[in-house]
Each structure stands twice: as structure tokens, then as C-alpha cells.
Image: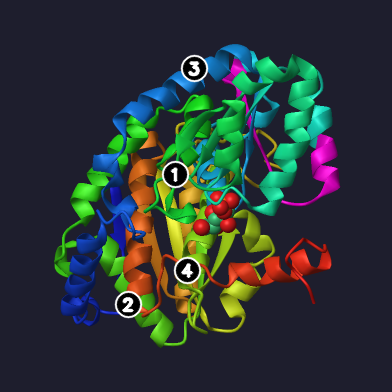
Amino acid sequence: MDIEVKLSKTGIEKKEVLKYKEEVEKIHKNLLSRANDENDFVGWMHLPTNYDKKEFKRIEAAAKRINKDSDILLVIGIGGSYLGARAVIEALSSSFYTMQTLKQRKHTLVLFAGNNLSPNYINDLIDVIGDKDFSINVISKSGTTTEPAIAFRIFREILENKYGIDEARSRIYVTTDKSRGALKQLSKEEGYETFVIPDNIGGRFSVLTAVGLLPIATAGIDIEKLMKGAKIAEDAYNDSNLKYNECYQYAVMRNILYKQGKTTEVFANYEPKMHYMTEWLKQLYGESEGKDKKGIFPAGIDLTTDLHSMGQYMQDGLRNLFETIVYTCESKSKIKINSDDDNLDGLNYLAGKDLDYINKKAMEGTIEAHVSGGVPNIIIKMEKLDEENIGGLIYFFELSCAMSGSLLKVNPFNQPGVEEYKKNMFTLLEKPGYTK
Ligand code: PA5
């Protein structure tokens, strides 16, 4: 794992960060003391060490089986029950993996459903599946979330009509709570293969459990390397001494900036494959910190694309922003700009240069522009875009989020606000038990 955090473009000196040393140590000890508590939500903290090795093998076996019998794996889940898997798959696959042939991709195509209520989306998905062989991985910790429950009902029926009840059963994989919820009950009755979301790991912290690992392994990504990266990060960042812990320095920096009125954090990437990683980050931080009328608002931009849509605001709009760039040093693909005899496009000054180099120069220029425009920049640099670094990055952000939320004095592990829309929706839909 090779991840580095640069705070020098924030305008805040290291000694300001180090003033939080004692508070960070106290929070770290508190998190540690809760990490093995079955009734708490800090189980992700030692997960890269403690994960269930038997279940891990079962996940790898299921992924192999799905690759043998299915063109498509339909992953049904919402929020923490899909964003992490999608983030990792997109980061580590071809930018056009959904359009590749099976021969090009070499692995079952993973598609997602149950993360919206759009009939267009469902119909389009039914069309795409057509007569292809498919399996379902339905993921819900509570087992009762409406969006995935509806999608599961629809696609289970399609699966049963296509293969008959018995074969359909062998093509349904359920990831849910070990004993509670409607999905668990249904799995027991139908005999579906199930994987467990541990009690002490909440949805948005669950990507390194079966929640993320089964879809990720099915997409052909090496989940052993992913866990190895997370384990290296666990070892590196479980240092209570703020002076040596970049993960906690990042968490402290966010809080200092927030206190200075920088209430929006814009996560930026210079690699389109990282778009869903940004979506995962938005959920991780938004749901963990946005409570008690507090919290940094997490936003996201894809660069350089969004310099031509959000660039003006970033440079010159309301100065309540700071920017966190998650940046990959090395691109696997080399694209050189050739010289052109006529040079009508005036690009010969770039002849012989690599596109990756140009992307980097665009980034450096943008950082300077944004910093001088009053947007502090934090840079999180990854040497390579690979399994190990992505595993490490996931752990880095989970731990920094727990620290950051604790510094903000909110409970980073609950999400009481999410229930409000559900109550209203259920009342409007006349769900039994919900009245005006
Ligand atoms: O982070 C969380 O806990 C949430 O975003 C959940 O993942 C999301 O609401 C889906 O819940 P469930 O897995 O119970 O269907």
C-alpha cells in the first residue's frame, strides 16, 4: 500500500493540527475499546485482521460459480449496501466494462439495481438482461429496505420464471443480518445461500465484508489483495500518536477547516474510474457526520471534466469550500501525443508528451488556482490504482471518518435522519401501521 497525505496546501500549519494530539489519543482509545464489542458499531476497525476466513472462502467459491453459470450478476442494494462494491469495481475495471464482451472482460458483468425507484431503470435492465443467464445477490442489512425489496421481488419472479423455482434458488445469494429481518427469514424458507453482515458493522462501513466482497470478486478483482491493502492500512493508521498518523491528521484538518467556515468538502479526482469512489465518500461522510445540525457537506467533482461546469464556482464562488483530491500517480495506459506536420490545432507544443503528464500538469495548475482563489486543498496521493491501494484507501477513509465525526461530537455510526422520508413515504403509500 502506498498512500500519502499532503496538507501543505491548506494554509494551516502542522503545529495547529498537533494541538489536537490529546483529544485524538482519547478518541482513538475509545474507538479501540469498542472495536470488539458485538453490540457497538466499530467492528470495521479490526476487520482486515479479524474477518471471517471461512466465509471469505465461501465468497470466492460463490464468485467462481457465478462466473461459470451467469453472464450477469445483478446486485440489489442501496446506500452502504451497494456504493462500496460499485466504487471498487469501477476503480479497478475498464472504464467501459459494461460495454465489453465477455471475452474482453473475462468475468461476469456486475450490474446494480434496487438503488432507485425508477420504472425506466427497471425496464431498461430487464431489456439488457434479455435471455442472458443471470444470478442475483440481494444485499440488505435490515432486510426491509423498500427500494431493494421491490427490485428483488421483480427480479426474483423473472429468475423463477426463467429457470424454475429450484434452479432460481441456487442462483440467489443473500447478504444480510445473521438472524434478523425479512430477507433472513425468506432465505431460511427458500434455502438461499447467505452471507453475513456482522452486527457491529454499519452499512457504509461494510464494503470489506461480504456486502462488497462478493460482487467485487465476481467482477474478477482479487479480494485477497484488497484485504491485504486494508490490513496494511489498519497496521499503519492505528497509531494513537497524531504526529505520525496521516489518517488522523486528515480528520483533524477537516475539523479545523470546518471551524474556519469551510463547511463544504469537495472530493475531487482526476480519473473517471474514481467517480463512484467519490459517491461512496459522499455517503460515508454525509451519513456519518451530518447530524445534530452540524457536519461538513460532502460534494464531488470529476476533473478535468467538471472544470468546465463547476470550475467557475470552485474558483470564484462562495468561499465556504475546501477540496480533497484523491489522486493516482501512475496511469497504466500510455498515450503519447504525436507531432503533426500542419499543426493546425496548435498542439505541437505537446508533441512527445504523455497524456498522463498533461493530466498531472492540469492538476498542478488547478491546485494552484484554487488555493490562490481561497480554497484550501488536501491531497491524498496513491502511487498506483490497484487492489492493495484501494483496500488501504477504504480503511483510511473509514478510520478518518470515525475520528472526524467524533471530533465533531456527533455519533458517526447512526443515521436517524434517514428514517424521516421513509415515514412520510409509507404513510402516503398506506403501508399498514402508518397513518396520517
Ligand atoms: O450506511 C447505512 O447504514 C445505510 O446507508 C444503509 O446501507 C442503507 O440505508 C441500506 O440499508 P440496508 O442494508 O438495511 O438495506
Across and down, in percent, residue 337 comes to 56, 36
Q: Is mark 1 within 8 Å of ligand 1?
A: yes
Residue occupying image coordinates x 84% and y 29%: 127
Q: Which mark is residue 323?
A: 4
Q: Which residue is mark 2?
A: 407
Quadrant of residue 342 within the rendered picture: top right
Q: Alpha-carbon distance for marks 4 and 1?
A: 33 Å
The range drawn in magenta is 104-124
What crowding class fits label 4: few (fewer than 14 Cα within 10 Å), some (14-19), or many (20 or more)? many
Q: Which residue is mark 1?
A: 197
Q: Alpha-carbon distance for marks 4 and 2?
A: 20 Å
Q: Is residue 32 left or right of residue 52?
A: left
Across and down, in percent, residue 201 comes to 39, 52
Q: Is residue 242 visible?
A: yes
Q: Earlier in the sequence, mark 1 or mark 3?
A: 3
Across and down, in percent, residue 424 comes to 74, 71
What amino acid type should be assigned to the residue bearing mark 1? Ile
Q: Residue pushed farthest bottom?
A: 260
What amino acid type should be assigned to the residue bearing mark 2? Leu
Q: Earlier in the sequence, mark 4 or mark 3?
A: 3
Across and down, in percent, residue 20 comes to 22, 79
Q: Which mark is residue 64?
A: 3
Q: Is residue 333 visible?
A: no
Mark 4 touches mark 2? (CB < 8 Å)? no
Q: How is the image coloured?
A: rainbow
